[in-house]
Amino acid sequence: MSSRSLDEKIDKEEIISNHMRNILEIANPDATEEIMEKTPMRYAKALSEFTEGYYQSIPKLLNDAIFECDNYFEPILVKEISFVSTCEHHLLPFFGEAAICYIPNQKILGLSKFPRLVQCVSKKFQLQERLTRDIANILNEYLSPKGIVVMMKAVHSCMCLRGVKSWNSETRTVYKLGAFEDKENFRMFMDLLNAK
């Protein structure tokens, strides 16, 4: 991180902290001095971490880990990729796992980059549907695979902790491109996903 971006981060956290102090005064008029003094900056630092994806570069993240591979055309599946994101409607976390499967077309991506990409794209204010689509589209752009499918399952605290309070609800989203739009190929993905 450059000194300028570090200074910007410190400035941003200070501004958020000041606003959070005002919110705490309204929401909790009985807050202790310790809470009023330290919690606003704790919140600002947490929010800064939850939104760091806005400041990360996808090209920098992926470009040095794309490799030529001209003799492999079978599906590659990376699953159980943990993620945490923030619902843009209620600013509450949702979290779960992603699975990514693609059929290479001359290019493959280093395996550690799949969790890094999911974490980068999820560290924004998000909707699960858009998050699923964006991951698929980014990989499609950089790898030009024969097909790609991204499946995400998540628990949304905005659904569990407020409103309907549906504790056991889980949301699954799928986004398919290319060969995986074919039912047989998608069935192959599901078989791979569920294989023991």
Image: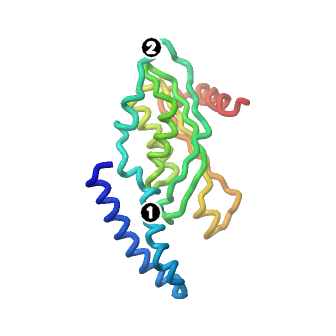
Left or right for 39, reference 54: right
Place of residue 118 in the rendered image (x, y in percent of width and height, measured from the top left):
49, 43
Residue of label 2: 70
Residue of label 1: 45
Q: Residue at x 26, y 54 (%)?
A: 4
* Residue 31 badge: none
Q: Secondary structure at mark 2?
A: loop
Decide: few, some or many residues near mark 2? Use Cα within 10 Å; few <14, some 14-19, many ≥20.
few
Does 86 appear above or below 162? above
Place of residue 63 in the rendered image (x, y in percent of width and height, measured from the top left):
36, 31
Residue sticking out furthest to the left: 4
Does 194 appear above or below 16? above
Does 34 appear above or below 165? below
- Mark 2–mark 1 Cα distance, whole angstroms, equals 45 Å
Left or right for 8, reference 34: left
Within the image, what quadrant is residue 142 found in? top left
Please tell me which residue lies in front, 174 or 105.
105
Q: Secondary structure at mark 1?
A: helix
Q: Residue at x 48, y 22 (%)?
A: 104
Please tell me which residue lies in front, 22 or 160.
22
Dot in front, 2 or 1: 1
Left or right for 82, reference 18: right
For badge 2, the amino acid type reads: Asp
Decide: few, some or many residues near mark 1? Use Cα within 10 Å; few <14, some 14-19, many ≥20.
some
Within the image, what quadrant is residue 182 found in? top right
Place of residue 132 in the rendered image (x, y in percent of width and height, measured from the top left):
50, 44
Residue sticking out furthest to the top: 71
